[in-house]
Image (spheres, rainbow, N blue to C red):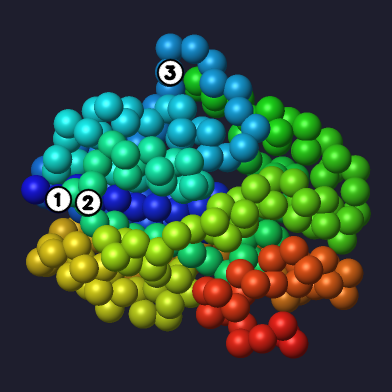
Amino acid sequence: MTQFVCFSHHKGASRLFRFQIFQPLAESLGRELIRYHPLNRLLVFRETELLELHSMPYDHISHSPDAVIIFGNAGPRVVRAMKTASSNFKGVHVVRDPRQMLVSAYFHHRAGHDIIWPGFYWEKLAEDRPVLERLNQEDGILYELDNISADVLGQMAAWEADDRILEMRLEDVERGAESSVQSLLKFLGVEGNHGIDVSNATANPDSKKWSGAFTPRIKSAFKERFGDLLLRYGYEKDNAW
């Protein structure tokens, strides 16, 4: 048996892949779905990957050869922990235009994203929200770029390719959802559709487009900090965008 794993990032279409693709797949195949869960104590965390580094049952993963495992904060420490727990898996690494991730994160962190939920307290977001509420949009996006989004985009920058993991861009899925899902299932070695419905494959459809939010200051700061990510993942051919 081979485990199926979804590696995704905060504000990077993680919900779409985890809950519209991998969860129905697990249910259809009758496999256990493993995701992070509350501990017996409140987990106070700052960096996003600590959410799953400390609340995923890695020992259980080691003894669940046919599980479907979903990560929404696949930082390097989380990926190492998964690979230490199991080597017999196939999966997908989901990426999204980093500029859109930044803008989506800004609006969601300024208002909407939970700071505390059962078992968890996001200390960094509790600190950032009052700042984001106080700043104008341009300064707020720049602040976001240096804080939570710096953490998340840094995880994408630290990603290491692995033959067991298929890389998929959200934008490609949006343009051809059915064919993208079939390519993923073929990579996993699974036949059929398994109840996966990707007719609405747009992540955060109400999110403001990055192109309408980027000012010259934001564009310059983004190029300096994470311009290489756009080249690495094929969103731009050079830094002249």
- For disc 3, the neighbor class at 10 Å (few under 14, some 14 to 19, many from 20) is few
List x then y, in percent, for residue 98.
Answer: 62, 65
Q: Is residue 218 above or below residue 108?
A: below
Mark before the other along the chain sequence, 1 or 2? 1
Query: What residue lies at 51% left-to-right and 47% top-to-bottom?
Result: 75
Q: Earlier in the sequence, mark 3 or mark 1?
A: 1
| Residue at the top extreme, as displayed | 40
Which tag, 3 or 2, sits closer to the chain's start?
A: 3
Of 136 and 158, the residue lying toward us = 158
* Badge 2: residue crowd in 10 Å (few <14, some 14–19, many ≥20): many
How far is mark 3 from mark 2, CA to CA?
25 Å
**Left or right side of 34 for 218:** right
Relative image position of residue 181 (x, y in whole percent): 28, 69
* Marks 1 & 2, CB-CB < 8 Å contact: yes
In the rendering, at what x and y percent does residue 111 appear?
72, 43
- Marks 3 and 1 close (CB-CB < 8 Å): no
Q: Residue at x 87, y 75 (%)?
A: 216
Residue found at x 65% / y 72%: 228
Q: Mark 3 or mark 2: which is in front? A: 2
- Which element is circle 2 on? strand
Q: Tell me: 75 left or right of 240.
A: left
Which type of secondary structure does the marked residue at label 3 adopt? Answer: loop
- CB within 8 Å, label 3 to label 2: no
Mark identifier at residue 2: 1
Query: Can you identify the residue that label 2 sits on?
Result: 89
Classed neighbour count for the residue bearing mark 1: other residues with Cα under 10 Å, few (<14), some (14–19), many (≥20): some
What type is the residue that disc 2 sits on? Answer: Phe
Q: Nearer the viewer, residue 84 or 178?
A: 84
Q: Report whether residue 120 is seen.
A: yes
Q: Quadrant of the C terminus?
A: bottom right
